[in-house]
Image (cartoon, rainbow, N blue to C red):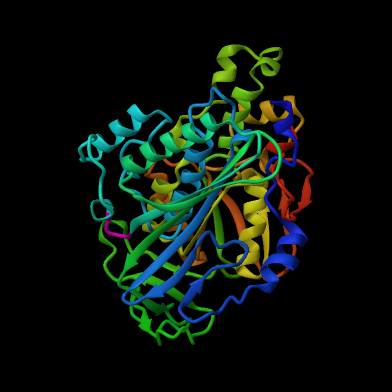
Amino acid sequence: MEENRTTDAFRPAGGRLLQQSVLKHIRRKADGVKEGAAIGYDAAIFQNGDNLIVQAVGAQPTARIPADYPLTAGELAWITAENQLAACGVYAATAETAHATGSAGTAEAAATEAGYASDREMTAGTAATEAGRVLGAEVLLVAGSSCPEEVIRREMQRIAAFATARGCPIVGGNTVWHGEGTSCLVQVVMTGSVPEYEVMQEKPADGTAEGDAAQAIPADGTAESGVMLAVSDPGNFGPQSRRKPMAQDRVFFLGETGCLGADILVHREKERLSRRFSESYIDTMRYEANAFSVAPLCKAALDAGAVFLHDVSNGGVHAALYQLAEAAGCGIAVRHEGLTIRQSVIELSEALGINPYQLLGTGGLLAVVPEERAEAFISQMNGTGIRIGDAGRLTKEKARIVRAESFPMERYLNLPEGDVLDTI
């Protein structure tokens, strides 16, 4: 197992490499493409007739995940892709009900609770929600030459159960042997659809537009930076408008810092942690599997007036904040105290010598809210029971800075070359 814990096992490209050697060469404004191929954007969005198609990718290596962990690498990759679709208003069938915890039996129970028969596969049509629906997923497996076949078999068995519980058919994929080692990288490419979007423009600053009415602008995307996308019939989820984040927007953090990374480390480093903490205290560092889905957070935030969402993943909340500033093309001033975190996760991180704010943060969400809606957003979110922190605001200045109010601390954010989970 030690062989697979090196930083070479899984290290998402970041920083200069991603910007200069990857994204620089991608044509970002191809016909029909609304969003995609840019730091800070969770999914690709492109026009297909009267629908917008949303596509996202999740990836996770088996080397990262302890053998006794309740979720497999493939299931975690699936959740990551689901989270990125949810940030764009596309949800899996079971997003509001139960969440699978890693066993086929629990996945079937989730399907049953959602109102579907557990002994039959749901179709993409039954997975539809008012806001959008998942159409299908492709699963790609890249296995080292010494990866046992039973590892691949287990990943696919569990992913298949996950897919059934969520009403999302697996429609394709690829399996290859590549390189040395016993690990397998599992990638999930998930596609969803959102019907009848309209291109809208924000209310003019002079207040000439009445209420929240928005003026339609050409569908060719020729409008200026105030462009947003709005679902014409959002159902129960409120006006799901989406636009590019910009300076003076407020940024809120929903959920908790480093929850997936902390939960994995509790399993991986249990013996080491037990030398310092009691079993009962170690239990407070654990998370339930449904904590890693941001779909309920996305729905609540959009309903409360958020105009842009970005899920937290590799590199933790500090990486996500940097990515959000990149998406906005401006700076960000972050309140350290606004990044909600459990005290036990802080102590876990101190014991292992890592920064919890750079720890795998699947389950956390950043919400961008216009200044004029901020107080109403806070009030409505406080009624949901979701943990929320006032993380700061986007700025005209280019600096990306985290400052603490309760003690002397100032840190400049950069896009990290990986996640501290992979350094232990």
In this view of the protein, which residue sits in the foreground, 247 or 173?
Answer: 173
Locate residue 397: give its quadrant: bottom right
| Residue shown at the point (58%, 12%) measured from the top left | 279
What is the magenta segment's predominant secondary structure? loop
Q: Is residue 231 magenta?
A: no
163 sits left or right of 61 in the view? left
Q: Is residue 144 above or below residue 298?
A: above
Q: Residue 125, located in which quarter of the rendered image?
A: bottom left
Q: Where is residue 53 in the image (x, y as percent from the top left)?
A: 40, 67
**Residue ID at (55%, 14%):** 280
Q: Position of residue 60 (x, y in %)?
A: 58, 42
Q: Is residue 253 visible?
A: no
Image location of residue 84, percent across then percent down: 48, 54
Residue, x 40% and y 87% (percent of image)?
218
Residue drawn at (66%, 22%) of the image: 269
**Quadrant that contains the C terminus:** top right
Q: Quadrant of the N terminus?
A: top right
**Camera-side residue of 208 and 353:** 353
Question: Where residue 172 sits in the image (x, y, percent)?
Answer: 42, 53
Q: Is residue 324 visible?
A: yes
The magenta span reads 128-132
**Position above or below: 125 against 219:** above
